[in-house]
Structure formats: structure tokens, C-alpha cells
């Protein structure tokens, strides 16, 4: 599970351990208002380097959910800066997951999400249909329905937020990159910002450095988190294009109205720099495709099970979907007996292994998952 998809280089990596200890010996923390420090500067440079061209501004947040809150606030302030203060709602794809705080919950799937009990307390957002499954699915119906909703609501919508190509905690749903190309184009026409939530998909997980790279689009705003510190400490970042920063500067406050106490914590930034250095110095692309091939091979036997409805792989993500809610006890015990620990949810038994997994590790993981699925019969 890579500790909820974060520990991409595994546990106790000597380089990451050293980066953390070295920074602790220099300085553990200093406020980031009116002050800056080297780990944050280095990390911001690195993020700008590896992200799609144009995402030149970086804001550090404490967690994935907080970065989503910041992205939504950025979009609303941007629209105010352009004199469009009625644009305060957010459009989002059904089936999505964007975090557990109030704003983030409001853009999670309104029905399948874990947050139905809060519906009345949340801002009513604009829910667009979920694109059909598969990388090459036909989009004509989806485009017609989505276009009607966006056009109808465009005077009140500040931004669209999406998890590009792979919706994670909302159901491990893989959908066509071509839908991103269309969303990029249409949101530009309507003056709506496009926010890519890459918290789960970033840093090579889907086979590209960021999932938006599958469609070669550049979002206006992008959130990263989870694997950012290699699973060591909580940290997220929000990147945006210069026109977004200018728009915010033109709003009445002149600055983004967000300033977390532990913004850009130096310990977290130092580990993140070391983590991204490890990633970019490696041949991560071939490595992720090696993992993907092993998952395809290893999970394929699950398709023969009667109660398995789908087996799918994207990058270093492998999913077995069954026709009922997963029996947690049976699945966890069976997988453990095979030397594998998994954390299934709903109807999904899945793995997002660390990139340091050997082919032998992957064989073990896959047979554990297939046996766990089999035990549910
Ligand atoms: C995990 C996740 C979040 C929330 O991140 P936290 O660090 O858990 O707050 C938001 N969006 C996506 C796509 C995620 O996978």
C-alpha cells in the first residue's frame, strides 16, 4: 500500500533518513511568513522543474486536503480579481475524492463518497458526469452532458477540480486522457480554471510524472501531496500558472488569504527534496512500466474468478474489483497468510507498491491479492 501511496521508495531509505537528520541538526522549523529557507526554495525549484511547463508558482500546505482548500480559495480569489465575484461554486467529476476537510468534502462524490452524512453542511457544488471507464472509451455522450452543465452554470463556477486519468479513493476508476483535453479547452473558453488534483497520481505513479502529462495539458492549478515526502512527513504543495497569481494579486486583499503556521516545514521540505532527487535520478519511467507489466501478469489469474468483475492496471497501480463489498476480515487474513498486507475498500482489492519492489516482491504481492480475492468466493 506504500502507506496510502506515499512511501514510493520504501521504508527507512538511507538517503531520506539522512536528509531528515541533517535538517534536524540545522534547524527543525522557522515560520514561513516574511522569511524563507533553503529547503523550501530548493523544493519549489524542483517542483517547477518537473511539473508541466507554466506552473511556476508554488504554495506549500500541510496536507493533501489543505492543499485542495487552498486551490479552491485560489480559484475564488482569482475570479474576484477579475471582477467575477459571483463565481464561487466549483465543478467536479462524480466519483471523485479530494480529501476530508469541508471544502474538499464538498467536491467529493456526493453519493458514493464517505461524506453523505455532511451533505447539508457542505456547499452545493456542480457535479459533472464521471467519464466512462477505459483509456480509449467513446466520449461523445459524456461531452454532451458535461458541456450542458458547464455552459448552464458558467456564471457561478470558479473552477473545475479533477483527479486526472485515475480517480483513486473514489473507486480506482481509470478514464480517457482525451476527456482532459476537452475539459482544458472548454474551461478556457468559459473562463473557468482547471485544477488537477495530482495528490494520488503525481510523481510517476500512473506511468507519467503527472497524470495530466497523459493528455499533454497544463492545468491552471495543480495539487501534489502523498508521495511528495516519500511517506516521511505530511506536506503538500499547490502550483499555479502566473495568470492565476496575477489574478489573486488583483483581488482586494492583494495576496492569497491562507497562511498555515507550519507552512513549508523545513524537515518536510528537506526530505521532499531528497525524495524527488532520488526519483528524478532514477529511470522511474521504465521502472514503473516494469511494475505495471508484473501487475498485469500477476493479477491476470483473478479474471478467472466468478465474482471478479474487473482487473485493471495503470502504471504502478493494480486493481481487482469484485461484485460485492470486500469481506475485510477474510481478505486481510488471506493476504497476510501470503505475506502481503493490503487495505481494501468497498469492492476493491488493490495495490500501489513502492517503486523499490523487486520482481519477486511483485510476484508475492500479486499472489497474495489473487488468493485474497479467491478466498471471498
Ligand atoms: C489522499 C488524497 C487527498 C487528501 O490528502 P490528505 O493528505 O489525506 O489530506 C486529496 N486528493 C486525493 C486525490 C487524494 O488521493
Image (cartoon, rainbow, N blue to C red):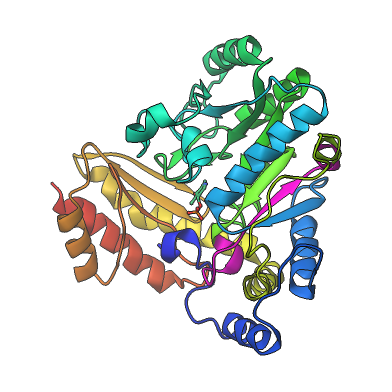
Residue nearest the viewer, comparing 181 with 266: 266
Q: Is residue 240 within the magenta segment?
A: yes
Regarding residue 216, the answer to whether it shows in the image is: no
Q: Is residue 243 within the magenta segment?
A: yes
Percent x, y for residue 11?
A: 47, 77
Residue nearest the viewer, comparing 26 with 6: 26
Percent x, y for residue 136?
A: 55, 30
Percent x, y for residue 103?
A: 53, 38
Q: Is residue 367 above or below residue 198?
A: below
Residue drawn at (57%, 50%) of the image: 66
Bounds of the magenta segment: 227-245
Q: Is residue 234 above or below residue 138?
A: below
Percent x, y for residue 165?
A: 56, 39
Q: Is residue 111 above or below residue 320?
A: above
Q: Is residue 238 above or below residue 186?
A: below
Residue drawn at (81%, 64%) of the image: 34
Q: Is residue 97 left or right of residue 187?
A: left
Amino acid at each position: 500500500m506504500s502507506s496510502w501511496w506515499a512511501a514510493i521508495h520504501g521504508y527507512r531509505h538511507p538517503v531520506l533518513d539522512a536528509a531528515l537528520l541533517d535538517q534536524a541538526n540545522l534547524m527543525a522549523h522557522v515560520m514561513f511568513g516574511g522569511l524563507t529557507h533553503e529547503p523550501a526554495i530548493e523544493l519549489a525549484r524542483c517542483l517547477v522543474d518537473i511539473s508541466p511547463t507554466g506552473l511556476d508558482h508554488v504554495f506549500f500546505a500541510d496536507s493533501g486536503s489543505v492543499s485542495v482548500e487552498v486551490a479552491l480559495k485560489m480559484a475564488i480569489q482569482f475570479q474576484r480579481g477579475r471582477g467575477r465575484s459571483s463565481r464561487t461554486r466549483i465543478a467536479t467529476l462524480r466519483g471523485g475524492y479530494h480529501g476530508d476537510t469541508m471544502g474538499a468534502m464538498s467536491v467529493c462524490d456526493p453519493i458514493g463518497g464517505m461524506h453523505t452524512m455532511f451533505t447539508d453542511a457542505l456547499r452545493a457544488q456542480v457535479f459533472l458526469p464521471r467519464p466512462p471507464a477505459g483509456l480509449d472509451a467513446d466520449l461523445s455522450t459524456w461531452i454532451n452532458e458535461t458541456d450542458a452543465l458547464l455552459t448552464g452554470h458558467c456564471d457561478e463556477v470558479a473552477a473545475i477540480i479533477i483527479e486526472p486519468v485515475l480517480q483513486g479513493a473514489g473507486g480506482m476508476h481509470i478514464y480517457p486522457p482525451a476527456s482532459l483535453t476537452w475539459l482544458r479547452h472548454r474551461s478556457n473558453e468559459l473562463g473557468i480554471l482547471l485544477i488537477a488534483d495530482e495528490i494520488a497520481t503525481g510523481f510517476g505513479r500512473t506511468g507519467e510524472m503527472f497524470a495530466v502529462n497523459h493528455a499533454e495539458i497544463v492545468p491552471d492549478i495543480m495539487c501534489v501531496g502523498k508521495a511528495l515526502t516519500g511517506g516521511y512527513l505530511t506536506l503538500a504543495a499547490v502550483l499555479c500558472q502566473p495568470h492565476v497569481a496575477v489574478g489573486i494579486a488583483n483581488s482586494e486583499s492583494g495576496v492569497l488569504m491562507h497562511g498555515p503556521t507550519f507552512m513549508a516545514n523545513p524537515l518536510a521540505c528537506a526530505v521532499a527534496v531528497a525524495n524527488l532527487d532520488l526519483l528524478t535520478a532514477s529511470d522511474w519511467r521504465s521502472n514503473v512500466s516494469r511494475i505495471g507489466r508484473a501487475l498485469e501478469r500477476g493479477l491476470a489469474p483473478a479474471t478467472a474468478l466468478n465474482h471478479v468483475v474487473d482487473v485493471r492496471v495503470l502504471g504502478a497501480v493494480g486493481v481487482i474489483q469484485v461484485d460485492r463489498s470486500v469481506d475485510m476480515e477474510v481478505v486481510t487474513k488471506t493476504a497476510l497468510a501470503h505475506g502481503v498486507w493490503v487495505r481494501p475498500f468497498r469492492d476493491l482489492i488493490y495495490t500501489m507498491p513502492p517503486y523499490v519492489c523487486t520482481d519477486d516482491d511483485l510476484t508475492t504481492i500479486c499472489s497474495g491479492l489473487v488468493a485474497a480475492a479467491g478466498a471471498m468466493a
